[in-house]
Image (cartoon, helix red, strand yellow):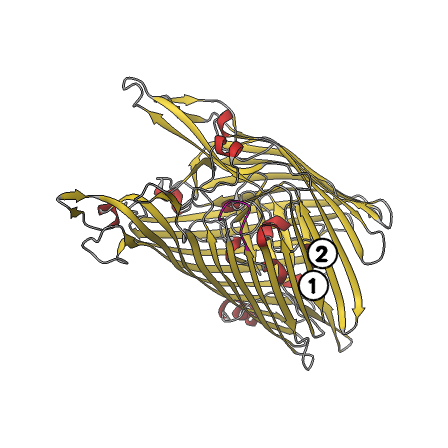
Amino acid sequence: MKKLLFSMLFAVSFITVSAQKTTTTNDTVKVEKLDEVFLKSVRVSADSPITHSNMDKEELSKRNLGQDLPQLLNFLPAVVTTSDAGAGVGYTGIRVRGSDATRVNVTINGIPYNDSESQGTFWVDLPDFASSVQSLQLQRGVGTSTNGSGAFGASLNILSDGISKNPSAELSTSYGSFETLKHTAKFTTGLLQDRFEISGRLSKITSDGYVDRASSDLKSYFVQGAYKGDNTLIKVLAFGGREVTYQSWFGIDAETLETDRTFNPAGMYTDEDGTVRFHENQVDDYDQDHYQLLWNQRYDNNWSTNVTLNYTKGQGFFEEYKEDGELQFHGLSPVIVEGETISNADLIRRRWLDNNFYAINGDVNYKDDQWDATTGVFYSYYEGLHFGEVIWSRFFTEGNFGDQYYFGTGDKHEFTAFSKATFKLDDTWSFYGDLQARIVNYKTGGLTSDVVDLEVDETYEFFNPKFGATYKFNERNQLYASYSRANREPNRSDFEGGTTVAEQLDDYELGWRFVSPKVQVNSNVYYMDYKNQLVLTGELDNSGAPIRTTSGNSYRLGLEVDAVIQLSNKFALRPNAALSNNKNKDFVTSKDGALVNLGDTDISFSPSVIAANMIEYKPIEGLQLAFLSKFVGDQYMGNIDSEVSKLDSYFTNDFSVNYTLKNVLFMKEIVLSGLVNNLFNVEYVSNGYFFTFDDTWTDPDTITTIEGAGFYPQATTNFLVGATVKF
């Protein structure tokens, strides 16, 4: 036992991911494919009292033609996806149960992917990562204990490619609307000497975007080396990407939405001749690289350990043309031109992020006929630099271009320890328990991008218990119930806005699962009770990031149902629906110069109805047709139930086709794919922003609150077609 604990706690130069598990019977080693053994610390089984959905590589590949991973998850229960560029390439986002991306905990091979400071998830930094995903699990609600910031709406854990026994290679390409083009090349050596494997992927995606100039130039890679012994699995991974995307997070107002819905105001300025122009390099330019070392060790039929080491490097900037910018604010001196002092001038600035993220993760698992128990620890350290520079101004000023006009730091330490177990009492009852302790320290220094001091040194200590039980009536029916608590710290933007209070969530889930040869049904009701929930106000900061405010007490109450219905050997239905009531209790806001209690209001970006369906038809072997539908109900972009902030409901339909030809000439397979998005040309909006300000100019004696909104239009009918050749 001491040897096991020593291996877990001190062999920190190794880590775990996915591959194969070995079992020994009568002195014979049997290799069993069990990739997900490496995610025991963050995943749950089919019988667990945790509400979840799974997707594997095969299902992801059906629509993987260049769009980001959130778009491939669009038809899961309670999911809403967004795209700044309008077509699913570039900056995209996902919301689950009304919770935005900062509240969806994402892990890759058990390592947090959410940015430590913003808590957001930027899929544009990992373009085409779906091509290197073995499987994923979306847990709705708090879910099981996981690493990184607490799950306040869902957790998404991703397992990268597993080991392949046989050598193979594949080339794929796709083309579609808005000059969207994707090229991917993959290979694996297969197991060499039944022990070693090397595999990799290179991808390139370009797109002009549906919105004007919302272009994307994305490159990514994935390289893996693996060693598999009788009781040992070690994997070394390197993956990352480079993205250059033209900014499209400014949105447009309601009038422009009606008259010119693809208009993009980003980079717009007026030159000396009075001509309206657009800055050519109004882009986001960012590199991100991940390095992981993964180790799984099996000691006997009951005991095994997983240890993980991760380093992530991120660096980049976004550039913007600032018309009539204040020189002194940007560290530049006023200039005298023909006897006139010039204090404001057009300039171009870059705002940089430079960060490092280190993480160690280890766990011990014990399993027998009744118990499946895992105990683990996690530690991470993040260091981030934030700074801005001016690279051009219309007038030469004292000071050097490239000098930093603001500089700030952010350092975050996190330590987590957990212990969870499933106890199978008999063939009908099983019980689940999960205890997690999490300590977070966040410290900042220097200036923000608004050139304001930000000095933070806060430590949070959280205890997150989770309990549940599953009762199996028979082979087809089971009931489950669970209670989970989550706490989470504010992010950097919250601290900039003066918020230091942590959030707390109590999540109650009750579910029923039915499984038969022809029909599978999952249904659950949930009640999520929040204290000091940080809800989106609808406003954006000067970097395009959402601003949040503490709503006091709030809740989400919902019903979710999803099913797979096999009508025949050729026809299948996959419907799901999520009905919910999402409320702030006694919400107080400032209106017309006074504080007003609005009573119970809708939580922002939380539609009460989300539904989807897939109709799958396989007329002949190798051919699959699918008709996919998605409905999202009305939602408000703010928390005051203002009609100005309302996003109308929308109903869209897609059509996909996949045809597989086997053993053609020297090729194992040729897969032809096609996807038509928004088949019926619906003009809809899935995201936007809402703001208010006090008007004191119209009548100096009266304060009047003015409301406004911006919208991100999504693409009308568009298509993607592709071909994959496997050798």
Identify the mark nearer the N-term, 1 or 2: 2
Q: Residue at x 64, y 50 (%)?
A: 72
Q: Quadrant of residue 204?
A: bottom right
The residue identified by callout 2 is 673
The residue identified by callout 1 is 724
Label 1: element kind:
strand
Q: Give x and y (percent) for residue 434.
A: 59, 50
Q: Give x and y (percent) for residue 329.
A: 24, 46
Q: How many marks?
A: 2
Q: Residue at x 29, y 54 (%)?
A: 392
Relative placement, left or right, of 225 versus 21 is left
Q: Are marks 1 and 2 in contact (CB under 8 Å)?
A: yes
Relative placement, left or right, of 10 versus 431 is left
The quadrant the C terminus occupies is: bottom right
- In the picture, the disc for residue 480 is none
Residue 210 covered by magenta stretch: yes
Q: Give x and y (percent) for residue 377.
A: 51, 60
